[in-house]
């Protein structure tokens, strides 16, 4: 447990990803720190990291059971620079923007699935 958060991982389902260490570290750091930062107060925090291969991509999925995101309301702002979805939680609004820019620069992409009050899953698509 880190910061009272149960973090589990399963990287067995996919092969190796060839990516710069600095950028991969930044992606994982930003997604993990958001999962921890936006945890729900009424339940123990859990974060899962898994990989899988789909078509021409290796996918890293980071799933949490946190407060979730209202995608209808915030879909356009999620990956924008300096846009924050929750004013009561400390942050600068650059983390998800950085993840998106790194992936776009490397011919990949990032997607989000979420339900308000139930958590979120961020999927990062690394081209093979």
Image (spheres, rainbow, N blue to C red):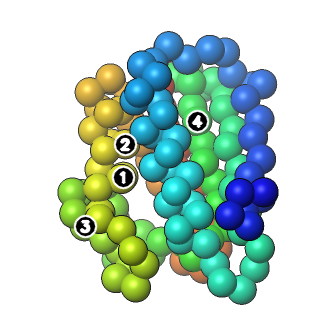
What SS does tag 2 mark? helix
Q: Position of residue 96 (x, y in %)?
A: 36, 52
* Disc 1 secondary structure class: helix
Q: Is residue 103 above or below residue 30?
A: above
State if disc 1 and disc 4 touch (CB < 8 Å). Answer: no
Dot 2: within a 10 Å radius of its alpha carbon, few (fewer than 14), some, or many (20 or more) residues? many
Task: Locate residue 80: give its quadrant.
Answer: bottom left
x 50%, y 13%: residue: 18
Q: Which residue is mark 2?
A: 99
Question: Of marks 3 and 2, which one's residue comes earlier in the chain?
Answer: 3
Q: Residue at x 58, y 36 (%)?
A: 60
If you read the primary sequence from the N terminus, does the residue marked by circle 4 or circle 1 appear first? 4
The image shows residue 49 at horizontal and vertical percentages of: 67, 43
Residue 61: x and y, percent? 60, 43
Distance (Cα) linking label 4 and label 1: 15 Å
The residues bearing labels 3 and 1 have C-alpha atoms spaced at a distance of: 10 Å
Check disc 4 and report the residue beneath it.
60
Q: In this figure, which residue is indicated by the disc labeled 3?
A: 83
Task: Identify residue for label 1.
Answer: 96
Dividing the picture into quadrants, the one containing residue 72 is: bottom left
Q: Is residue 113 visible?
A: no
Residue 31 at least partly seen:
yes
Secondary structure of the residue carrying tag 3 is loop
């Amino acid at each position: 447990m880190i910061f009272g958060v149960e973090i589990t991982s399963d990287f067995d389902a996919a092969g190796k990803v060839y990516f710069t260490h600095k950028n991969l570290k930044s992606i994982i750091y930003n997604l993990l720190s958001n999962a921890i930062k936006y945890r729900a107060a009424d339940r123990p925090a859990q974060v899962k990291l898994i990989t899988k291969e789909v078509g021409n991509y290796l996918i890293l999925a980071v799933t949490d059971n946190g407060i979730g995101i209202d995608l209808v309301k915030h879909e356009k702002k999620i990956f924008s620079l300096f846009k924050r979805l929750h004013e009561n939680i400390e942050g600068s609004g650059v983390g998800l923007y950085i993840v998106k820019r790194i992936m776009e620069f490397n011919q990949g992409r990032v997607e989000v699935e979420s339900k308000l009050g139930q958590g979120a899953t961020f999927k990062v698509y690394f081209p093979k």
